[in-house]
Image: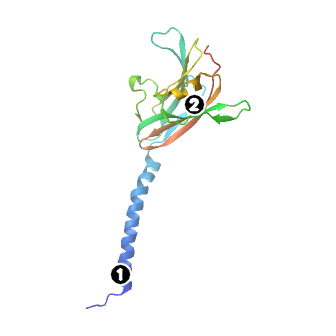
Amino acid sequence: MADIGMTDLIGPTVGAIAGAAFTIVGTIYIPRIRRWLIGPKLKISFGDSREYQRITKLRGQTEDTIFIRLKVTNSSPTVAEGCQPYLVGVEVRQEDGSYSDNQFCDSIPLAWSAHGEKRHNPIDIPRWVNQYVDLVSATEGTNNFGVHLRNNLNRYENMFHEGHYYRFKVQVSAKNADPVFIKIEFQWLRSCS
């Protein structure tokens, strides 16, 4: 019978450990690398053009309503699945010009523009298809504005009826893409005219 020494066991043992390590690392990192290379690439933007500030008459109203909107696009050939916009932060500008946290501590879904009753549901975004998020709106002749949240929580009701400079932080997340963020400054002068 041959005598098996310690050196004869090291090679197969090291090979088995290395194989297991590569399998674990591959399972964890290959999907991330694949998503980074060919996965959806979301972009969220805001600007001064009419696509970001839409004036329209709502059904049954004679006054104009202005909508402040954000544009979300996907620059990858891979469809961004289950995209959902969230309001994740609200800050109020202080007299010294700095912004302070305004007790807003939730992540509340925002509305997709032109999606009717399903406006708060996640959507898929193909390559180069523009989708818009309704952030805020105000109707001519009114003294307040509305934030297009899925749920209007009582604890934030008074926050949006004061004359302030606001800074909204919006996040768009997807099942198969990294989240994107934008901060929008909005001045409310207690009237829409």
Visible in this render: residue 67? no
Q: Nearer the viewer, mark 1 or mark 2?
A: 1
User: Within the image, what quadrant is residue 120 found in?
Assistant: top left
Residue 77 higher or lower than 120, as above or below:
below
Residue 35 higher or lower than 191, as above or below:
below
Question: Where's residue 14, x and y in %?
Answer: 39, 75
Q: In which quarter of the image is the N terminus?
A: bottom left
Q: In which quarter of the image is the C terminus?
A: top right
All told, the count of numbered labels is 2
Residue drawn at x 45%, y 41% is 76
Which residue ends up furthest to the front in the rendered image? 155
Question: Where's residue 110, x and y in %?
Answer: 48, 30
Q: Do the residues labelled 1 and 2 touch (CB within 8 Å)?
A: no
Under mark 2, the amino acid is: Phe
Q: Is mark 1 on a helix, strand or loop?
A: helix
Q: Which colour scheme is used?
A: rainbow
Which residue ends up furthest to the right in the rendered image? 96
The residue to which callout 2 is attached is 46
User: Within the image, what quadrant is residue 78 found in?
Assistant: top left
**Mark 1 burial class by Cα count in 10 Å: few <14, some 14-19, many 20+:** few
Depth check, front residue: 128 or 79: 79
Under mark 1, the amino acid is: Leu
The residue to which callout 1 is attached is 9
Question: Where's residue 179, x and y in %?
Answer: 49, 42
Question: Where's residue 66, x and y in %?
Answer: 55, 18
Visible in this render: residue 4? yes
Residue drawn at x 35%, y 77% is 12
Residue drawn at x 56%, y 20% is 145
**Mark 2 burial class by Cα count in 10 Å: few <14, some 14-19, many 20+:** some
Q: Earlier in the sequence, mark 1 or mark 2?
A: 1
Give the left or right position of residue 67, taking residue 19 as reference.
Answer: right
Query: Label 1, label 2: how many angstroms apart (C-alpha)?
Result: 63 Å
